[in-house]
Amino acid sequence: MTTPSLWETSPVTFRLRLPATWKIHNAFHVQLLKPYRDPNTIFVGRQPPPPPPPVLVQNKPEYEVESVLAHRRRRNGTVELLIRWKGYDPSEDSWVSEFDMGNARRPLHDYLIKQGVTSTTHL
């Protein structure tokens, strides 16, 4: 069973489960709180903005990488990276071979630093 995200400590005070990185107190007066509303139900029928078109590099479409989210090693030893595409919904995240990251070195470099390694061979 999971810990609740919200619990009442007095008739006018609630505590919230907040990320540890947030440097604020987790107790709030009831007047500061309001129920969460799913934006998909608030704006029913609103179409999301279209994703950006690919950039043409040597007459081939190429999409911009926002960030590298995760990695996995295939049975053949190659590394695949889970990519978040710039301007696209997270449902469009996809696995890409490390060899296809030619023009996206910066996001790959940032991910490797977060992992504490210098190259994909150490993942």
Image: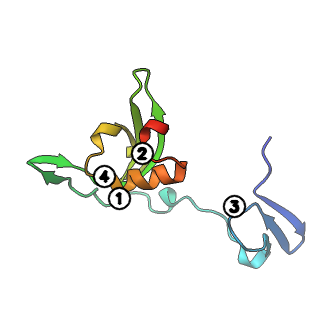
The answer to which of marks 4 and 2 sits earlier in the sequence is 2
The answer to which of marks 2 and 1 sits earlier in the sequence is 1
Q: Position of residue 104 (x, y in %)?
A: 30, 52
Name the residue type under label 3: Pro
Question: Among all residues in the image, which is located at the extreme top?
Answer: 75
Q: Mark 3 — residue?
A: 19
Dot 4: element: loop
The answer to which of marks 2 and 3 sits earlier in the sequence is 3
Q: Mark 2 — residue?
A: 91
In which image quadrant can residue 15 be found? bottom right
Q: Residues within 10 Å of mark 1 (few under 14, many from 20)?
A: few
How far is mark 2 from mark 1, CA to CA?
13 Å
Dot 2: element: helix
92 to the left or right of 4: left
Q: Is residue 49 above or below residue 118?
A: below
Residue depicted at x 82% and y 68%:
14
The answer to which of marks 3 and 4 sits earlier in the sequence is 3
In which image quadrant can residue 7 be found? bottom right
Q: State the mark number for residue 104.
A: 4
Find out whether the residues at labels 3 and 4 contact each other: C-beta distance under 8 Å: no
Name the residue type under label 2: Ser
Q: How many marks?
A: 4
In which image quadrant can residue 110 be found? bottom left
Q: Mark 1 — residue?
A: 48
Dot 3: element: loop
